[in-house]
Amino acid sequence: MNKKEKAVKPERDLSVAGAILILIVVFATIIGGIRMGIGTNMALFLGAFEAMITCLILRKPWGDVQKPIIDFMSGTLVVCIILIDVGIMVGAWIIGGTVPSLMYYGLKLITPGLVVPMAFILCSIMSVFTGTSFGSIATMGIAVTGVAIGVGVPMPLVAGAVVAGAHVGDKMSPMSDSTNLCSGVAGVDLYDHIGSMMHTTVPAAIISLVLYWIMGLKYTASSATDENVQLMLTTLDSNFRISLLALVPAILMIVIAVAKIPAVLGLTSCSVFSIFWAMLMQGCSFSEVMTVAQSGYVSDTGVALVDGILNRGGISSMMGTIGMIILACMMGGALQATGALKVFMDNILMKKMKSAKSLVVITMIYNYLILAVSGNQMLGAVMSGPTFAETYDEMDVHRKVLTRCMGDTTINGSALIPWSVATVYAAGVLGTGNAAFIPYEFFCYIVPIFTVISAFTGWAMWHSDGTPFLSKKNRKVKEAA
């Protein structure tokens, strides 16, 4: 044997125990990093580094390690462009009066007798238009909880309606970073992902609305008006040209979504339109709007409540999310290169996955476990996509079922974890002091019920070629007859 032959060593085989160890170490590093407060991005960076070092220990050729990383990143470039569009759009919508007008007219609709159901409806609408649950909680949420105190509605009940409504758009809006993340990491078209979630989200939202309406009926006698609502209305009216015409960009966004115009084309067009519409509606200069589109809007109304709500938007605000997507691809690609995920799936999870229904249930359990341990809604999506995507392909289940599971569990379920960022934020902003509102987040509980129903009945389930499960079954029955 010559020196050259000695230098080339074969790759080491990976055992099931080794695969589990790799997954535990990498996931523990990421989750531990987040719990320590170093941030999701740096935690993912450390996890990616560990995965790459593991590949070298297993004697993987560097080309085989780098390829899946590059493949993962190339698959998310569209998502990054969409997020840039969203940052531009949100900034333009604020300076152009679209968001302020949405807030103004939404607040006008609130009446004491409908505080609870309106809390859910208005926060749902705001989150769908803005793509952020945090922003919805900080706008409509604060307003309706203030009204609720005045009319004697229990704070946990109305706060639960607020948080649940805010999560409708957080998982459904084409402008939501979590919606784009779920579709991006699994390589699913954005509107296919949203369309898939409609089957679990719409019925859950309707049932939730009925429950909130029934529970709010007993609080219809008082006609008290909250000072926060009046202060916000006055401030918005004095600082922006509030008009129904200001809502045109939001309407255009709905048209784009309904028409299923390709996301990059549709959102880029809407962003450009929003910039010029802001100039027309508010009399802003081109440079002012472009500065906001880049760096975000800086509100100086003098009212801390309103300023805190409107200080957002811009490309800069999306850089953290884009960075997280890139690092997630780096981690996911390197982890895939180790072969640990394949060994784990083939020898453990796949043995439990005898059908599409078990695949969906195991995906849900996996996501909830990550969410419960980390308290981070994005982490579940980051891990779930690379872990299950190929398995869904192998079992002939469309990946939009996977992304729906991700949205219905790790994104939607974050509001149900007391120590999650979403819950801690809501408790702080709404002033509840604790997470007593969790039992009243009906929407967040009902959505996964429909996810399970879908899996076990075949309703709203599709094969990889897009063929519905039920139609294929019906066709087989007809052929047999």
Image (tube, helix red, strand yellow):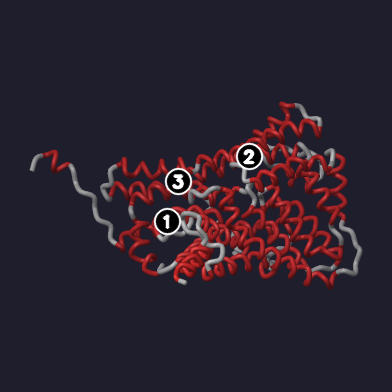
Q: Position of residue 93 (x, y in %)?
A: 73, 40
Q: Position of residue 441 (x, y in %)?
A: 68, 66
Q: Nearer the viewer, mark 2 or mark 3?
A: 2
Residue at 83 percent of width and 39 percent of height: 240
SS type, badge 1: helix
Residue at image point 47% right, 59% down = 463
Q: Earlier in the sequence, mark 2 or mark 3?
A: 2
Q: Going by the image, does 194 lie left or right of 388?
A: right
Judging depth in this view, the residue of 238 and 246 nearest the camera is: 246
Amino acid carrying mark 2 in the image: Gly
According to the picture, the residue beneath numbered tag 2 turns out to be 266
Residue type beneath disc 1: Asp
Q: Quadrant of the N terminus?
A: top left
Q: Is residue 75 left or right of residue 274?
A: left
Q: Which residue is mark 3?
A: 329
Tell me residue 52's x, y (percent): 35, 46
Q: Which mark is residue 393?
A: 1
Residue closer to the observer: 93 or 426: 93
Q: Is residue 32 visible?
A: no
For numbered disc 3, what is the local secondary structure?
A: helix
